[in-house]
Image: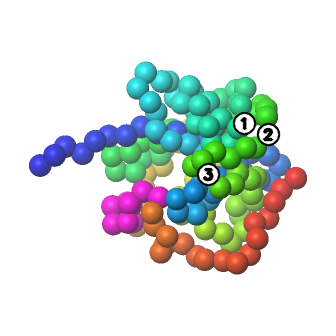
């Protein structure tokens, strides 16, 4: 049996007013937090800075580690990005990048994002999240980021925040 690889990734959390920064993925159309895998030799904050710029065009001035999110063989460091400068320019990986009020919209938001942002809103201190049985099963069954059947489809437009 092949050993299961262990991945470490970052999720960039940027808040503006009541909105959170989301990117609409090119491959599956889901709205997700910007982020990705840490490359060899990078620190968490270097990877956060790179991923945020690559996916959105924004540059963060300060970073704060907010949470550790565990999904089976994946650890995701949730990093809050502050003092962001620049304008939103989605990359080839993303169709759009927008600040959305995730609690007032009915869009194809990745299922883990709503729970994470709810926890971030409630907690000012560091915390660890572990995937529940449903989330872990969905990832194993459908693959990471390819769980289209598990999301509500909606024709409503996103609620943009100012």
Name the secondary structure under disc 1: loop
> Residue at the location (72% across, 68% down)?
105
Residue 23 or 105: which is nearer the viewer? 23
**Is residue 82 depicted above or below 24 in this figure?**
above
Coloring scheme used: rainbow
Residue under pointer 3:
94
Is disc 1 surrounded by few (<14), some (14 to 19) or many (20+) residues within 10 Å? many
* Circle 1 residue: 58
Residue in the image at 76% along x and 52% along y: 99
Please, what secondary structure does the residue beneath circle 3 have?
strand
Marks 2 and 3, Cα distance to the nearest angstrom? 15 Å
Q: Which residues are magenta?
A: 136-145
Q: Of circles 3 and 1, which is in front?
A: 3
Q: Position of residue 36 (x, y in %)?
A: 51, 41
58 lies left or right of 113: right
* Residue under numbered circle 2: 87
């Amino acid at each position: 049996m092949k050993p299961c690889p262990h991945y470490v990734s970052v999720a960039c959390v940027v808040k503006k007013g009541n909105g959170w920064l989301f990117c609409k993925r090119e491959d599956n159309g889901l709205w997700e937090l910007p982020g990705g895998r840490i490359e060899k030799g990078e620190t968490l904050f270097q990877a956060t800075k790179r991923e945020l710029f690559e996916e959105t065009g924004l540059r963060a001035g300060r970073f704060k580690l907010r949470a550790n999110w565990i999904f089976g063989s994946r650890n995701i460091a949730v990093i809050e990005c502050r003092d962001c400068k620049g304008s939103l320019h989605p990359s080839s990986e993303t169709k759009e990048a927008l600040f959305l009020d995730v609690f007032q919209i009915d869009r194809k938001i990745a299922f883990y994002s709503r729970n994470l942002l709810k926890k971030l809103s409630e907690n000012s201190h560091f915390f660890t999240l572990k995937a529940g049985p449903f989330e872990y099963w969905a990832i194993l069954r459908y693959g990471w980021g390819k769980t289209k059947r598990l999301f509500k489809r909606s024709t409503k437009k996103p609620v943009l925040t100012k």
